[in-house]
Image (cartoon, rainbow, N blue to C red):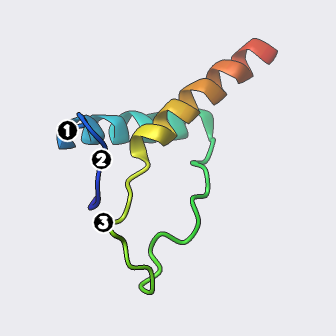
Amino acid sequence: MSGSWGIGCLASDVTKARQELEKLKKDTGYLEPDRGNLDDPNIEWKYGKPDYTMVNLEYMKITTDSAQVVQ
C-alpha cells in the first residue's frame, strides 16, 4: 500500500500487521472500519494516501477482546 505509515513505522511492520489483521478478520468474521472513499481519484493527498492497517489492527484487537469479555 502506498502513503505514509507514520513515524517509526517500517514497511515490514505494516506487512506483518496486515497479515495479522487478515487472520483476525478470518477468525472472527469482523470487518475493518469503513474509512470512507480513500480511492476517490479526486482526492489530492498531501503526503500520499493514508494506510490505516496499524490502526485497524489495534481496533480489531480491542474489539475482539471486548467481545470475549462480554460472552
Measured as percent of width and height from the top left, residue 51 is found at 38, 53
Q: Is residue 41 left or right of residue 25?
A: left
Q: Name the kind of residue labelled 3 in the image.
A: Gly
Q: Quadrant of the C terminus?
A: top right
Q: Name the kind of residue labelled 2 in the image.
A: Trp
Measured as percent of width and height from the top left, residue 36 is found at 59, 66
> In the drawing, what numbered circle is on residue 55?
none
Q: Nearer the viewer, residue 33 or 24?
A: 33
Disc 2 on helix, strand or loop? Answer: loop
**Residue position for label 3:** 48
The tag earlier along the polypeptide, 3 or 1, is 1
- Residue drawn 28% across the image and 35% down it: 16
Is the residue under label 2 in contact with that under label 1 (CB below 8 Å)?
A: yes
Q: Residues within 10 Å of mark 3 (few under 14, many from 20)?
A: few
Q: Residues within 10 Å of mark 2 (few under 14, many from 20)?
A: some
- Residue drawn 30% across the image and 47% down it: 5
Q: Is residue 68 left or right of residue 13?
A: right
> In the drawing, what numbered circle is on residue 5?
2
The tag earlier along the polypeptide, 2 or 3, is 2
Disc 1 on helix, strand or loop? Answer: loop
Residue 63 vertical placement versus 21 (above, below):
above
**Residue position for label 1:** 10
Q: Is residue 23 left or right of residue 27?
A: left
Residue 28 vertical placement versus 47 (above, below):
above
Q: Residues within 10 Å of mark 1 (few under 14, many from 20)?
A: few
